[in-house]
Image (tube, helix red, strand yellow):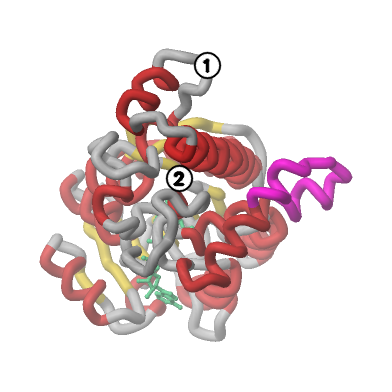
Amino acid sequence: MAVIGWIGLGHMGGPMSAHLVTAGHEVRGFDLDEAACLVAAERGVRVCESIAETVAGVDAVFTSLPRNEHVREVYAATAGVWATAPAGALLLDTSTVDVDTSRWCHAESAANGFRFVDAPISGGIAGAIRGSLTFMLGGDPDAVAAARPLVEPMAAHVFDLGGPTLGIASKLANNLMLFVSLLGVAEGAALAASLGLDPARFHEVASASSGDSWPLRTWYPAPGVVETSPANRNFDATFSAALAEKDLSFAVAAGEASGLHIPAAELALDQFRLLAAEGYADKDASLVAKYPPADGTV
Ligand code: NAD
């Protein structure tokens, strides 16, 4: 069994680290948020006061942090991971970052004597709680091979995508598909209702037709149709508009950097930006076509 440091005990990192405790690893955790630390402690994580204390003597360090800048800070700070973890430790970043940040993590980890794996995840908070996430691993073969048994207690699927940054590339391309598709589902649902169709009946039709998709089955934005839909819970976020905007902006930037024309992703990004700007950043991304129309009740 391994000694593992876990930095970022939020919606994803909290339940994920708990699966490693259950798997028999010694897990030390750190988060700036006191409430997150208390919950982690209840789940058997030994909560520490600093990054240095968290990573002292560990075999591996996981990070689950909100944005690029948090990941860069946690690795590169004077008392950050690179400065305080034992040389040779395996570093795994499960955060959704942009390709440049992931590339930088690989290069600087190697320069500081560490093995790094980009290890983004799909499956949402429910997948983190159930331990049924999809992991997309990118890195050198020996590092990815070492990462696999560590992520398995949290995963239903583990994919080795090949070299450095290919895990995050896969995550960004997947989420581009998800959010463009979600926008289509949200607009289709709004159009169907505005033309007089019963939402549940239309959902039945689309599910049995060529409109079928993961967001249709999981996030259909009319209340009372799909059990898992945030529409049933006032659009409280299962995946926030702010996170959708972040992921799409990274996908669009990656497309631009490789000279690719991806107008549907750009248009979807504009819609999530608008939703966030209108005050719905923390609401669920499935509110994107404002179905039901925002009337102050959401
Ligand atoms: P979150 O905000 O709930 O958790 C992040 C945690 O990091 C917070 O508890 C915060 O206090 C902590 N943190 C921030 N800076 C820190 C620092 N310097 N040191 C220690 N702790 C620090 O976010 P989340 O929903 O758990 O997402 C984490 C990552 O996983 C993000 O990159 C997100 O895009 C990605 N992700 C999220 C989902 C999802 O459904 N929520 C799904 C897939 C991927």
Provide the residue designation for mark 1: 210
Say left or right for 165 vs 128. Answer: right
Q: Is mark 2 within 8 Å of ligand 1?
A: yes
Q: Is residue 264 magenta?
A: yes
Disc number placed over residue 121 in the picture, else none:
2
The amino acid type of the residue labelled 1 equals: Ser
Q: Quadrant of the C terminus?
A: bottom left
- Mark 1 lies on a secondary structure that is loop
The region drawn magenta spans 252-268
Q: Is mark 1 within 8 Å of ligand 1?
A: no
Say left or right for 86 vs 58. Answer: right
Residue pictured at 47% horizontal, 76% vertical: 84
Q: Residue furthest left?
A: 42
Residue pictured at 31% horizontal, 59% vertical: 236
Residue pictured at 69% horizontal, 45% vertical: 265
Q: Please rate how many residues cluster around mark 2, counting C-alpha atoms within 10 Å: few if below 14, some from 14 to 19, many from 20.
A: many
139 or 276: nearer the eye?
276
Q: Residue furthest front?
A: 196
On the question of residue 260 being in view, the answer is yes
The amino acid type of the residue labelled 2 equals: Ile
Residue pictured at 53% horizontal, 73% vertical: 70
